[in-house]
Image (tube, coloured by chain):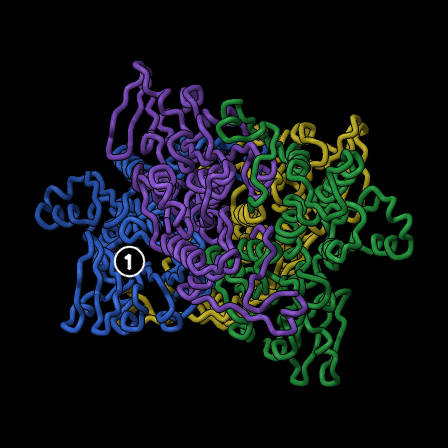
Chain colours: A blue, B yellow, C green, D purple
């Protein structure tokens, strides 16, 4: 079996050891990128074994993105800059799970938070959660901190950064190192000054300094730590997926990409409840019948959004 | 075409006017119950026209449940009881969209909120949002307010209510009038005293009074109003679904139940952004290509949970 | 003794029945206005009996202002207009106790809240709590709701209201009926339309409608109710003040205005803790000695701000 | 002049150089301890020069305690333990400014927070802010984190720590190193294991580990940093106090301890508003007259609590 994170092991096996690859019982993949590559492989008809997409299980997603980033955004910025959040004007680009986590944390600390979005549904969610949805140019001159969380590229470019005020902090919570166009800052007119590990001052000819964290790489990975609780959720999901693929009777899984079965998703969650001293309620027979549910779950239809 | 809410018109047509029913171009249904009946009809092979499940579009669901209930839970309880929320101990049964809205509002008002859940994933969400997940019997003697939001039946029964303390407020935000076993309170030893419209005191032989709102019916419908904004979201979704089914070329929809296409869901959201003075960002060509997206949307895969 | 609210009884007695007034054992006053009149009387050397200013006791102030208004601002606006708070842009004029309560509640409901202030300390508090501090003219064209809470007069005048957008809601949570210059709206070019009790539409020649609540009077008194809990705090403070003045040995109180002794303030608080099932901790002898405190209180110096 | 922090310079001068001490124009003191020593000196009739208590100015207090601790409690715990806050049960001992800051931050991060208090007024505030007020023994077996913020001694003793569960984190945000009875943990049956700088595991014979931060010293000083903004507030207050004492005409200040004049307190606040892009409103002449205020402040009576 292959337990992969990013798809490199899968790629290596399928390219270099095609004979061995066919004998594999299954692949478990936990990253966005790896999952993307699996779907491409499947689409191209080159996936010869079943694969489990652990990345999009509810529990894993919420902990890796929403809950984890809600904490690491504050942690990463504190450790790298010691900035005070109260009263600061912050622009968060993107209101997906990561952006939602960042905004919630910053609001709790007394920041004034603005959001940019391309998706009207996420934009409306930002409105209803109390954040002003703006175009980046509307606030770029006023903000103290800019955080990217879009998964896209060049969300913040040189034009934007030229307009930022002195002392503005710039960092990326989203995806890879593409969101901020860091390359555009490597011009002869700007001076880079490394003030400490992971922190660069970029200095304009007029003396303006922009504080760039981790050279635009993921600040939550570069400047914060991942709580063991988050790792535990992911590892439990991976282990269950491996066991499921290994034990599955012939025919349950074809050579395709599958989401972790909801029952296992629920099982991973249930394994982590005792550490919160949380006590679930059990359905009575009568209630289960009324709801058309099995008392052991799964409890929701597949399209349920949590 | 049929624009239905609850499925009664659809039922009437299919049973009483089967000939006419076959000539219909499509059905648009907005309620949980009506959607449930449509899926049953489809499963039984008796759905002879395409139907659109508007109930489960993202925008409609969030506004009808999460955002609307976040406001109406406070409103309904204030209008009916004038209760002060600060410092009150409140048990919310169920942490779905409605429960999440209730908990968030009450936490904002300074209540101490407990949650019951049957689903470990929702239970874990409650934990991460700062609510203690308990069995009802753990807190029933201490709480000041109990709110049901499960969609189930007999979540609160006579045994529970017997243990509640004097003055406890009991109401239902969930589903129909089944969640509280009100029938069990209609026994000769208890005295009912209507103290005002929608508010009954139920009096135990020892003088204990429980305050039951709307006789266990939906308190947000009985004691609060529905903001025009919520109605606008729902009506827009319905209208778009009607137009889509009417205009769709032959073959796009078969005799089955469909979710509102994501692009229309996004369109409904976008129609309501101007009232918040919200400004969306547009993808550049380059960014759209990088993300593999059409600049006009849809912006998310179908399994995206928002 | 006189138990007064507004100072009218005190005024009547001192003016019309000076002989009787001198025989009184003491005055207890609970309102801002009444307290103001007492201090004036004292300054003028005309206060011939001791008086207790109950208005400024900690417990009374916090419940009458901060905690009570945090709830009544939502309640009053819902009952009068059914407005949805999520995503609305709201301007709160004044960030004293009342303004703080309003802002906290609206933030919890997902509103985007702006604040005006004259006092830099309160302004800085607003910043640190996450509210943008603006001049009224900066946001007047964009807001959906304007709430006054300054204690001042003509905070919102005709010029401001002329700039508001169609459908803007205008109300007063602060002081008397002076904060909004309602008189300036009674001109022939504007049409008043009473749409329901406490709600007027004021219509501009171009059709713009402004929604004025309670004709500028206190919206929390006009459109909401006062929870019994708040009344209980005030009544307990008054009763204790009466008892104290009646029982005080000669010489403890001179003919002056006194704040409720901190020990009684603490006693009122302690009387209301059991309803929250709250359990205080007692100092050990050793701890009391270390802190230089009496185990029974008072626990704070007089200048403590809570 | 003396600019002191803790009172040591003042003590040295008054004891060792009494002649020089008498020639001093004034003392400015910023710490609780130093202020305490000044009041004792004054009470004993040994304070021969005016002294300014900067510690209790509104702006300084709020920033040093409430706003600063709201951020540093999260920061210090993250940097030392990488703990995840979501869902954790936390006991905060003491609901003064520091405790209020800690509770607000932890609530925002999704912790379930309990409070202990000795003062009924602060206890009632905790209730109204949504925190369960308990005796330490009620929750000591269940909590994941315990934070002291009382200013007292031996708030957490060996008996309490013996009852804590494995992995519980124990730290002090309050006063000196007295709040946790660390001495009681230095017994032969317990093993101390330093796992990293500022973090000790204390191991019970049955294997239970308690995580003690900074050996019970102030965790916000030991494991977090102080934002430059907080330092700026304090330094500005000190500088203004020095200038005021130096420039004051003879007779304005006697040999006593004074609070920073409110006007200067307001001035310090006003100096820090521009960094938040905050715009104050100015009173009109008419409004100033109505309120009985000078347009330049001070804006509040001395007993105002903010």
> Quick check: C304 left or right of B182?
left
Residue displayed at 63% across by 62% down: C149
Quadrant of the image containing the N terminus of chain A: top left
Residue B54 x %, y %: 53, 59
Quick one: C303 or D228, which is closer to the camera? C303
Q: Quadrant of residue C34?
A: bottom right
Q: Whole-percent x and y of residue B31?
A: 59, 55
Answer left or right for B122 relative to B217.
left
- Identify the residue at image location x=64%, y=59%: B226
Q: Can residue B151 be seen in this view?
A: no
Q: Name the residue under label 1.
A: A172
Q: Which chain carries label 1?
A: A
Which quarter of the picture shows residue C280? top right
Q: Residue placed farthest to the left in the image? A: A16
Above-or-below relation of C117 to B104: below
Residue C186 place in picture, x, y as percent: 74, 79
Residue drawn 58% across the image and 61% down it: D299
Q: Where is residue B253 in the image (x, y as percent from the top left)?
A: 46, 64
Count of marks, rendered view:
1
Q: Residue at x 78, y 26 (%)?
A: B206
Horizontal relation, residue C85 to residue D10: left or right: right
| Nearer to me, B153 or C108 | C108
Secondary element type, mark 1 = strand
In the displayed orientation, state which residue is furthest to the front. Answer: D19
Mark 1 nearby-residue class (10 Å; few <14, some 14–19, many ≥20)? many
């Amino acid at each position: 079996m292959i337990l992969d994170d990013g798809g490199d092991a899968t790629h290596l096996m399928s390219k270099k050891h095609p004979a061995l690859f066919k004998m594999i019982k299954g692949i478990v993949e936990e990253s966005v990128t790896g999952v993307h590559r699996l779907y491409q492989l499947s689409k191209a008809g080159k996936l010869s074994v079943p694969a489990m997409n652990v990345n999009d299980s509810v529990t894993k997603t919420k902990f890796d993105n929403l809950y984890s980033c809600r904490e690491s955004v504050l942690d990463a910025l504190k450790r790298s800059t010691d900035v005070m959040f109260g009263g600061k004007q912050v622009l968060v680009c993107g209101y997906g799970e990561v952006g939602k986590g960042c905004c919630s944390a910053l609001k709790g600390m007394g920041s004034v938070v603005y959001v940019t979005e391309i998706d009207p549904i996420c934009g409306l969610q930002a409105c209803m959660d109390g954040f002003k949805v703006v175009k980046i140019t509307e606030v770029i001159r006023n903000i103290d901190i800019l955080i990217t969380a879009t998964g896209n590229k060049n969300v913040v470019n040189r034009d934007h950064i030229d307009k930022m005020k002195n002392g503005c902090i710039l960092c990326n919570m989203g995806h890879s190192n593409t969101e901020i166009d860091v390359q555009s800052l490597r011009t002869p007119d700007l001076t880079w000054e490394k003030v400490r590990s992971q922190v660069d001052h970029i200095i304009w000819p007029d003396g303006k300094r922009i504080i760039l964290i981790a050279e635009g790489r993921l600040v939550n990975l570069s400047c914060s730590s991942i709580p063991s609780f988050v790792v535990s959720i992911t590892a439990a999901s991976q282990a269950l997926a491996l066991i499921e693929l290994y034990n599955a009777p012939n025919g349950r899984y074809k050579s395709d990409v599958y989401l972790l079965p909801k029952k296992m998703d629920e099982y991973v969650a249930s394994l982590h409840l005792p550490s919160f001293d949380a006590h679930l309620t059990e359905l009575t027979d009568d209630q289960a019948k009324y709801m058309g549910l099995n008392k052991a779950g799964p409890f929701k239809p597949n399209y349920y959004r949590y």
